[in-house]
Image (tube, rainbow, N blue to C red):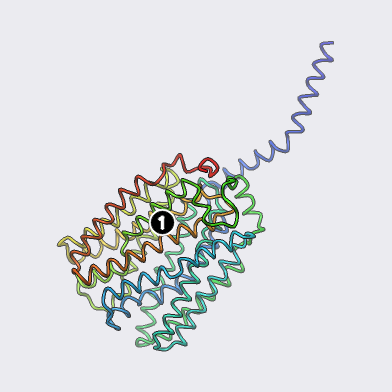
Amino acid sequence: MYLASTDAVAKAKAKATTEAEPEVAAEAEETAEGKAKRGRVAGPVIALGAVSLVTDISSEMVTAVLPLYFVLQLGLSPLQFGFLDGLYNGVTAFVRLLGGYAADRGGRHKLVAGGGYALSALSRLGLLLAGGATAGIGAALAADRIGKGVRTAPRDALISLSSPPDTLGRAFGVHRAMDTTGALLGPLAAFALLWATADAYDAVFVVSFCFGLLGVLMLVAFVPGRHDATLVAATRREPREPSTTKRGRVVDLLRIPAFRRVLGAAALLGAATIGDAFLYLLLQRRLDFAVSWFPLLPLGAAAVYLLLAVPAGRLADRVGRRVPFLAGHAALLGGYVLLLCPTDGLPLLVGVLLLLGIFYAATDGVLMALATPVLPRGRRASGMAVLQTGQALTRLVAAAGFGAAWTLWGIGPALTCAVLALTVALAGAALLLPRTGSLQNPERQA
């Protein structure tokens, strides 16, 4: 009797083990795979980084000379330039929302992003055909910004969907480092072309178009689509969409409290960010160097960004993304203060560019990693588009406001207002941003 009961128990245990074996094996396999891949960045992230690298070479070849062209050649006032600079970065705010919505609907992230990359590439031909016509140049620049607005949220959503939650900071850091490499090479290429061709801007536009077209071809060839198994495996453990968030309604994302707080903090800090172009113009006026060197100023900040983007992402994964994000804005505040101080010469130049590079390394990709855990995977592109739109609109206001203050009161009072505004914004953002522990499942936030 004992042997019979023991045998029955053994058979029952064996049966239970056999039935559970597929799930246990699958879980063990997934755990082993996760451990093996820990520390590595997914292939789609590398592919998207390469696309961004090539595209940024194309973009920065043109944008590096815009402040010089607008202010020093066309003679626009700081107020006019502030409006144009803000418009240049904020005109596509609502297009971002459309791009995010279209990408989420049916999971067409690659298709929508590819359309944005293609439009930006074609805008280079628009600059070439516009000649010296202001309307044509404006239309071409608007097309470039629309393309950027359409592609940014789907691209970032692809990065987040291709990466495990605990490596999001590193994934965005690697992508931003590759993207910044293009931003570093673009002005160099423009400077070399203008020097070699005696300021032939047509040559810059043609080469820029070629790089933009190459980026589109790389996206088509190397970036996986929505049915790729990598994306499915990466997202199978992602939190489900909360029942309070209706698919198809972007505004319903604001029902997620943690996302509202991230959005509010980003918008508040964006309203106190005056823009890189103003910092470069202030450096040129303070140091009084030859205007021919102006297009090279972004290279200093880009080099720092390139070196620190990946370490900042890794730090964000370890200590939480809130701290590096706030610290990056504190570095930007230090750059403003440095411009107010009597510091001059090389210390001023190196200090401002170093702090600006730290700002971007600690905030750009980190903000996307900060928002990802509170966004359902089915609304990832839409949520990122809302976040990017909020930043773009508030930075438009900041650029126009600083330009008006510079025109009416002068450089010193305008910079003082910027320092005070960013200090208040930092304090407000520190209160708004949720702690790391609350940035988990969106269902808990609803």
- Observer-nearest residue: 365 or 199? 365
**Picture coordinates of residue 315, whole percent (x, y):** 41, 47
**Picture coordinates of residue 111, whole percent (x, y):** 61, 67
**Number of disc labels:** 1
The reply, left or right, for residue 152 in relation to residue 185 is right
Which residue lies most toward the left here? 342
Relative to 18, is 355 above or below?
below
At label 1, the amino acid type is: Ala
- Observer-nearest residue: 354 or 249? 249
Q: Name the residue under label 1.
A: 309
Mark 1 packing: few (<14 Cα in 10 Å), some, or many (20+)? Answer: many
Q: Quadrant of residue 26?
A: top right
Q: In which quarter of the image is residue 84?
A: bottom left
**Picture coordinates of residue 278, whole percent (x, y):** 28, 69
The reply, left or right, for residue 349 in relation to residue 67 is left
**Picture coordinates of residue 310, whole percent (x, y):** 43, 54
